[in-house]
Image (spheres, helix red, strand yellow):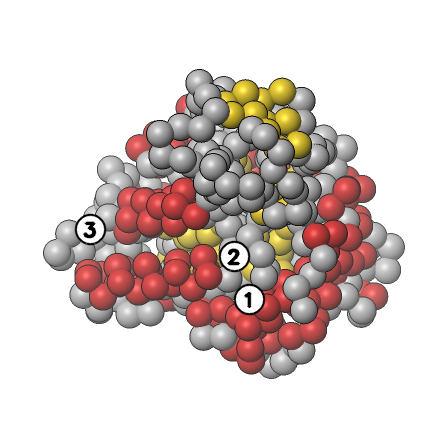
């Protein structure tokens, strides 16, 4: 049954991860031809578009190697099978993804955005996902890394820790290079956002401390007074704040968001028990939110609703309470749990989406799902559920009122007058009015011939005007 207008939102962030590390989601083969990889990407976006997702979190720097032509990083091993080798025939996956996603979005909706003038809320967006410290996944060796890889060019700050190779966040050289790499992408590509996942300092390895003694001792020798833990916190905080400032100075409309581990500290809220990302990774995500350094936060709440020790809803409510700056919250939902050893029922995902929607008035304004391959494969019918129930109608992304849009005014055609809640027009030579494919106040407005008596669904056309009910969400 088609839900009533009150059951589906006009604005909702509907994000999904497309993970490239280890070829999780795309490309499924690093040895496939350029044309096959490109066709697979387009087909994946078609699936997501068909399911009414409106945001893609595309991982383009999975292990300090790139899915785009970078002046700083080598081509990714997960793209071509050999790090540093360009795709042949040549193509730029990030450029293709941005163009494809925006074409799908812009082709699907033309919006009249009277209240905000913000036309950057495309129906399909690209988020630039990357990590600060992980230099190599699945190996702690530099063997086989491209010569221009950061772990070779700044080898004194590359550490084997656990089963991976990591860069030292306490190094100013590492931070500067990483910041410049991100801003290069913000400058050269029409991305909609910069998105970080949950890797800052690495997850701790039992019995081992992260081997950054030389960097810390140099800090102390230079007059630094912070304890090692406080210094590590400062390193991450400084990076997040500086990146936020540089993104806004470069392109003020580009969003900045982070998907931290979902538990800030064990015991917060009361009854929740688990790994503490604040003390374990020196990732004070609560501070980033309260300081307004991020435009949105997507804590990875990959747990069920009911168990009290790690409860999706209890943690959602706690994060809402930390959001004094009224930034957007997009809880991370673990779709992968329907296929791993947990074997979640599809109904758990449905409940989590509904719980987020129930908190929309508290800035829980959508979800980000991990990850895309389950929707492509329709694992256990998850795509069918989204198509017929959860996302059976499209929505556009929520407006971030504090962001300076790159389009600050809306050009109103000469034959159209917008005043209050009424749009009036004179017929043009085509017999069409140049509006309205937009969901507002629970209705979809569609282009109709101005010479007919038909009006938007649920409205009667009277003369040359439509009376529109205002939508407080813009």
Give the spatial CA distance, label 1 vs label 2. Answer: 8 Å
In the rendered structure, the answer to whether residue 63 lies left or right of residue 169 reads left
- In depth, the one of 331 and 175 nearer the eye is 331
Q: Which mark is residue 52?
A: 2
Q: Circle 1 sits in a helix, a strand or a loop, which is it?
A: helix
Q: Which residue is disc 3 drawn over?
A: 91
- SS class of the residue under badge 2? loop
Q: Position of residue 249 (x, y in %)?
A: 46, 21
Residue 470 in the image: x percent, y percent? 69, 32
Q: Residues within 10 Å of mark 3 (few under 14, many from 20)?
A: some
Q: Are marks 1 and 2 in contact (CB under 8 Å)?
A: yes
Residue reaching furthest to the right: 270
Q: What numbered label is drawn on residue 387?
A: 1
Task: Calculate the distance from the C-alpha at mark 3 to the C-alpha at mark 1.
Answer: 32 Å
The answer to whether one can see residue 37 in this image is: yes
* Quadrant placement of the C terminus: top right
Say if mark 3 contacts mark 1, CB within 8 Å.
Answer: no
- Regarding residue 184, the answer to whether it shows in the image is no
For the N terminus, the image quarter is bottom right
Q: Nearer the viewer, mark 2 or mark 3?
A: 2
């Amino acid at each position: 049954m088609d839900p009533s207008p009150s059951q589906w939102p006009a604005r909702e962030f509907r994000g999904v991860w497309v993970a490239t590390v280890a070829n999780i989601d795309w490309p499924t083969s690093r040895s496939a031809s350029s044309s096959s990889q490109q066709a697979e990407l387009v087909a994946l976006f078609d699936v997501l578009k068909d399911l009414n997702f409106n945001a893609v979190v595309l991982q383009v720097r999975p292990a300090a190697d790139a899915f785009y032509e970078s002046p700083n990083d080598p081509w990714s091993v997960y793209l071509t099978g050999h790090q540093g080798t360009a795709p042949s025939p040549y193509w730029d996956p990030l450029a293709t993804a941005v163009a494809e996603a925006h074409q799908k979005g812009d082709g699907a909706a033309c919006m009249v955005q009277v209240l905000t003038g913000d036309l950057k809320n495309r129906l399909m967006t690209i988020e630039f996902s990357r990590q600060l410290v992980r230099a190599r996944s699945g190996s702690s060796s530099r063997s086989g890394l491209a010569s221009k890889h950061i772990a070779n060019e700044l080898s004194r700050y590359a550490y084997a820790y656990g089963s991976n190779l990591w860069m030292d966040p306490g190094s100013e050289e590492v931070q500067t290079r990483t910041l410049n790499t991100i801003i290069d992408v913000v400058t050269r590509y029409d991305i909609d956002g910069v998105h970080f996942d949950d890797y800052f300092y690495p997850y701790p390895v039992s019995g081992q401390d992260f081997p950054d003694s030389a960097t810390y001792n140099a800090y102390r020798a230079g007059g630094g007074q912070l304890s090692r833990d406080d210094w590590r916190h400062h390193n991450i905080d400084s990076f997040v704040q500086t990146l936020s400032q540089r993104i806004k100075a470069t392109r003020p409309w580009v969003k900045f968001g982070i998907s931290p581990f979902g538990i800030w500290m064990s015991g917060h809220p009361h009854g929740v028990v688990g790994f503490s990302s604040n003390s374990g990774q020196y990732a004070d995500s609560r501070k980033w939110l309260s300081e307004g350094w991020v435009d949105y936060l997507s804590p990875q709440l990959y747990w069920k609703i009911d168990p009290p020790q790690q409860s999706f809803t209890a943690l959602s409510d706690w994060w809402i309470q930390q959001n004094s700056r009224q930034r957007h919250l997009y809880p991370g939902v673990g779709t992968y749990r329907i296929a791993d050893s947990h074997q979640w029922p599809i109904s758990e995902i449905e409940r989590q989406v509904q719980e987020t929607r129930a908190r929309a008035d508290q800035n829980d304004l959508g979800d980000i799902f991990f990850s895309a391959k389950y929707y492509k494969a329709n694992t256990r019918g998850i795509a069918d559920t989204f198509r017929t129930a959860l996302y059976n109608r499209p929505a556009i992304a929520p407006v971030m009122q504090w962001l300076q849009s790159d389009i600050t005014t809306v050009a109103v055609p000469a034959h159209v007058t917008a005043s209050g809640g009424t749009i009036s027009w004179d017929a043009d030579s085509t017999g069409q009015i140049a509006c309205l494919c937009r969901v507002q106040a629970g209705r979809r407005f569609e282009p109709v011939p101005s010479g007919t008596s038909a009006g938007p669904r649920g409205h009667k056309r009277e003369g040359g005007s439509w009376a529109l009910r205002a939508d407080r969400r813009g």
